[in-house]
Image: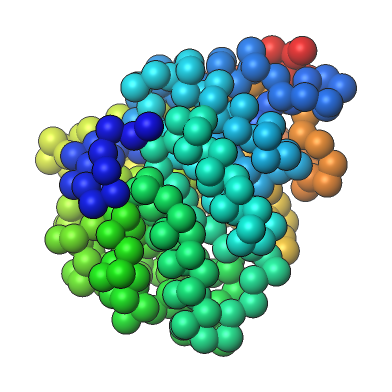
Amino acid sequence: MPDYVRTEARSWARERLVGAVNCTIPSFTADLRGINEAAIRHDTRLAIEHGFIGTLGVSEVNISVPEYADFLRIIKDEAGDRLVVTHHASWSNLAQNLEALRAAERAGAELVLLSYPPNFYPESEQDIYDYTRAVCDATDLAVILFPMFLWGFSPRVHPADIPSRLIRRLIDDCPNIAVIKAEGGFPGIQSVIECHRLFGDEVVISMPIEAELIPLSQLMPLQLSATSDHEYYGPTIPRVMRLLRDGRYDEATDIYWQLHPARKIKACLAPALHGGAFLNRQAWKFQGWLQGYNGGPLRQPTQRIHDAQMTALRKGLLDAGLSPSMSPFREFFTGRHPA
């Protein structure tokens, strides 16, 4: 159980969620019939070594609810209190989301990233409110509210995806909404600025996009970057966040420009890798493999990553001076801890 009660979720988040939260994607056995415990433990240890304060147990892969619960349980067992285990509330419908949420609580999750199913088609702010409220009411865990273009809300509801007036209602009515992952209206920084201005005294504002996190943190307090594929840069994002907290802006800016070659390559690849308004978890797993994480096979259906994309992502890290793995690409598809 978490070390806070529902009404303390916001104060817990303010105190505990200081730093960067990466993503851990499930690893599977070679025959794809089960999860790979050794690989999951390896990825958990490396996330701690790299300085992350938490990890998102990614659910947007082909995995059952019982397997996912075991996946989170392994992370929690390996990490203990060294990582905030974050449940990925991204499942096929509300009923399955609630089932997975209960399983995640039993597995030791302390935080919830709220997503919306592909078949959820709200036509009003009230529809979004009702779904969000149903999830928040079903748990005592702290919840990350996530305005994001991927949900497809903006053409029907509001260009900000979840407008500030709706966020206001949800914060007032759901005391366990403790964080806003402010990517509404992407691309652009208006959402994070608006959320900081309107809600920053009540909840933690997270900026998961490092290209915006580093400059914005020099102008406004941003204690959290959760959740994102920060493992692509190894320990760099946790390190730059410590510099920003210490006011060492020149050093943080130097890192911003150091990462720029890799950042530009990621941006150029994004339209091909992340089509269909769905993040390519195979690609994210490869990015982590470049920095020592397990890699390994994912079950069908999964998006693919091809040689040209893998070569480009590795070149970006080389150009940024971050020493990626130079092992043959075939080893990514096996993983560092095959089982």
Q: How is the image coloured?
A: rainbow
Q: Nearer the viewer, residue 277 or 305?
A: 277
Q: Would residue 28 appear left or right of 137 to someone viewing this image?
A: right
Residue 65 makes an appearance in the image: yes
Q: Nearer the viewer, residue 230 or 107?
A: 107
Q: Residue at coordinates 69% horizontally, 12% vertically from top-left?
A: 337
Residue 268's x, y, as percent? 61, 55
105 up-or-down from 29: above or below? below
Q: Residue at coordinates 52% horizontally, 79% vertically from top-left?
A: 127
Residue 322 makes an appearance in the image: no
Q: Would residue 231 appear left or right of 6 to someone viewing this image?
A: right
Picture quarter with the N terminus: top left
Q: Residue at coordinates 54% horizontally, 58% vertically from top-left?
A: 115
Q: Would residue 237 appear left or right of 74 to someone viewing this image?
A: left
**Within the image, what quadrant is residue 40 found in?**
top right
Q: Residue at coordinates 77% horizontally, 12% vertically from top-left?
A: 339
Q: Nearer the viewer, residue 154 or 57?
A: 57
Residue 214's x, y, as percent? 30, 48
The tally of labels here is 0
321 up-or-down from 309: above or below? above
**Within the image, what quadrant is residue 36 found in?**
top right
Residue 39's x, y, as percent? 64, 17
Residue 81's x, y, as percent? 34, 22
